[in-house]
Image: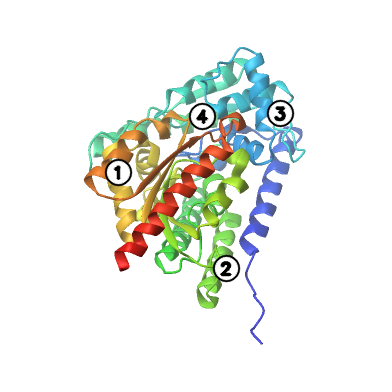
Amino acid sequence: MSEPYKHQGVGQKIQKQLLGDWYQRLEEAPARGEKVAYLFISGNLGELLENFGFHLVYPEVNALQCGVKKVAGQNILAAEDLGYSGDVCGYVKNDIGLLSGGNKMPQGTTLPPPDLLVCNYAGCATYLRWFEALAEFYGAEMVVLDVPYLRGTQGPSPEEVRYVVRQLEELAETCTRITGKTLDRDKFRQALEFTQESEELWSQVLHSARRRPAPIDAYFEAVFFMAPIYTMRGTKGCLDYYRALALEVQERVDRGIGPVPEEKVRIVMEGPPAWPHFRKFWEMFKKWGVVSVASTYSKVGGIFDQGFRHDPDRPMESMAEYMLGCYTNRNWGMRSELIKEYMEDYRADALVIHSVKSCRSFSVGQADLREQFIRDFEIPTLFIESDLADPRYFAEAQMKNRIDAFFEALHHRKVTARV
């Protein structure tokens, strides 16, 4: 008789507890006289803001939570009733609709108003307009960090890093003025030490998918595994989570556990998930024995699997490098090269691009990406479309037909190649 599992399900259980506690502390912050800051996931600077005692709100996380809980649709309709166009980002409209309804999250907690809005990602003009709308509604102070878009292929230049560092130092002064607290450099260093170790463990989890069969799905599972490192980075709770997750994944490796009963196809995924129909979306791939061994969406908050680590000895500089290097701040040449590297490194059979209607940061350029991988690299590539927040754009029958046809053809190609 085999030994019982010791670690399976631990990651999901701890993550649920961490997020529940996080939202509860947020709701209670104003009553305790504590400050609240809103910011974005891509290139976020949570460690810096938490140093001044801010509780953090990520509107993107709220939107995906609403999507998974199937209330994003009604929030989006409420925003459209206020005059927001059908073409506006679904995340934005979810946030506006949520706000108009009293900021009550589906799990029951109420989001507090911001004392500070930090637009930390400049790669999407919609983000700027989003926070401008919130600043006007709440009457809150707003800081915009100008993070240069990476145009070359070698990463950020020293000049770009210095440019962002100066802005971070100015932000620290603003935080001092709002909170009355100064930057505690010892505490900052300790937070980045927690961050660095968390990033190392998270990278190990992602790299485990190099194995055959892969012990994790680096898209459908990773989008939940990644939550603590993008929302609670720099905390002991985040580090403890990845220590527990690493044990769970290692047990999967030792016991031969995988995300599907039999791994038949290995893919790389580009683009965000269809949150309002997440389970149906995943099942369309599972039936073919498909495992995502790498994905780009799990890197929106940091490409740590490529070796980047925050540096406690260079806190501001490494934070600037992190902000400059996030996935959606990279040009399409850099993104394409990263995806190609994933295809080779993880021995993937195909690329799947999920293009979402309302996120231009991801979707613009994806059609060209498909052509490049098919024509130049001769890699089987599937292009499907829906949305990350708006349930109206998920055409289930049409999507299922395209996915089935693609993997049936891929299976036939594999069989004939062996003859």
Disc 3: which residue: 103
Which is more toward the observer, 31 or 92?
Answer: 92
| Amino acid bearing label 4 | Val
Query: In this view of the protein, can residue 155 be seen by the observer?
Result: no
Horizontal and vertical percent for residue 314?
A: 36, 48
Q: Nearer the viewer, residue 127 or 50?
A: 127
Q: Nearer the viewer, mark 1 or mark 3?
A: 1
Local secondary structure at mark 2: helix
The residue at the point 31 percent across, 39 percent down is 369
Residue topped by disc 1: 336
> How far, Cα to Cα, is label 4 from label 1?
29 Å
Amino acid type indicated by mark 3: Asn
The kind of residue on which mark 1 rests is Ser
Residue position marked by numbered label 4 in the rendering: 118
Q: Kindly give the residue lying farthest to the top in the view shown.
A: 83
Residue labelled with disc 2:
248
Please indicate whether residue 360 sits to the left or right of residue 81 in the image.
left
Cα gap from disc 2 to disc 4, whole angstroms = 35 Å
Give the CA distance from mark 3 to mark 2.
Answer: 35 Å
* Residue 380 percent location from the top left of the image: 33, 50
Mark 2 burial class by Cα count in 10 Å: few <14, some 14-19, many 20+: many
Q: Position of residue 146 (x, y in %)?
A: 38, 27
Which one is nearer the viewer's eye here, 26 or 282? 282
